Amino acid sequence: MQNIIWQNSKIDKNTDSNAFVLWFTGLSGSGKSTIAIELEKKLHELKKSVVLLDGDNIRHGLCSDLGFSVEDRKENLRRIREVAKLFCQNGTSALVSFITPFEEERKKAKELIGPNYIEIFVDCPLEVCQKRDPKGLYEKVKNGEISNFTGIEQEYQIPKTPDIIVNSAENSIEESINQILNYLTGKQYLTRE
């Protein structure tokens, strides 16, 4: 890293921005992206500068060179942590929707992003995720077309201390969004009328 110097901005972008990173974690099919997409729309309506960083979308560009080995998944998450941090530092809240199966990787995100990191565990039983199977991935696992799938052959480590637990099997999308908005309002990230 010789000759690489961090360039500081002349503008203090954190002063009034009140930006945050919502890190959605949970099994495939738990509803992470669905909730994040609807929340992005709601936050935009509330005049909050916000960007959605969805795991599948990121793999189309920034991380298109990565596979699904443990090492590639860790690199995928390292890149998205850095991107989310840059958005947050520049006054744009980021909604990060990634399975993020390992506690160690979520801890790294929290350490890098700091106090504006908010972890949301989208809790949904595996059986419900398999029944939903919005992308047909569980069917492909069953047919032997996909291996090392999180929750089946690869462990998903349930978050020990998430900031918010959303039960997507029992709560509607609207109820889940209201739960998150109430949290953000309580922490003074938002003011709602």
Image (tube, helix red, strand yellow):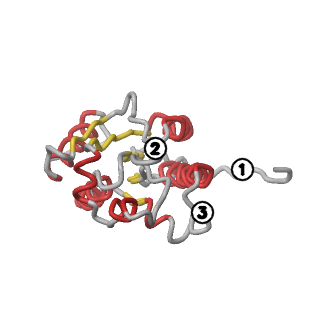
Q: Going by the picture, which residue comes out furthest to the right?
A: 2
| Mark sitting on residue 66 | 3
Left or right for 103, reference 28:
right
Q: Which of the 4 quarters of the picture holds residue 189?
A: top left
Left or right for 56, reference 179:
right
The residue that disc 1 covers is 6
Q: Position of residue 100 (x, y in %)?
A: 46, 46
| Mark sitting on residue 74 | none
Between marks 1 and 2 in the image, the one whose residue lies nearer the viewer? 2
Label whose residue precedes the other's in the sequence (1 or 2): 1
Between marks 3 and 1 in the image, the one whose residue lies nearer the viewer? 3
Secondary element under disc 2, as helix, strand or loop, is loop
- The residue lying toward the viewer, choosing from 155 and 11, is 155
Distance between mark 3 and mark 1 Cα atoms: 26 Å
Label whose residue precedes the other's in the sequence (2 or 3): 3
| Rendered view: 193 above or below 135 | above
x 27%, y 59%: residue: 34
x 46%, y 62%: residue: 146
x 56%, y 55%: residue: 76
Q: What amino acid type should be assigned to the residue bearing mark 2?
A: Pro
Mark 3 neighbour class, 10 Å CA radius: few under 14, some 14 to 19, many 20 or more: some
Q: Going by the picture, which residue comes out furthest to the bottom?
A: 60
Q: What amino acid type should be assigned to the residue bearing mark 3?
A: Leu
| Mark sitting on residue 101 | 2
Asked whether the beta carbons under mark 1 and mark 2 sit within 8 Å of each other, the answer is no
Res. 188 visible in picture:
yes
x 45%, y 53%: residue: 149
Q: What amino acid type should be assigned to the residue bearing mark 1?
A: Trp
| Rendered view: 116 above or below 85 | above
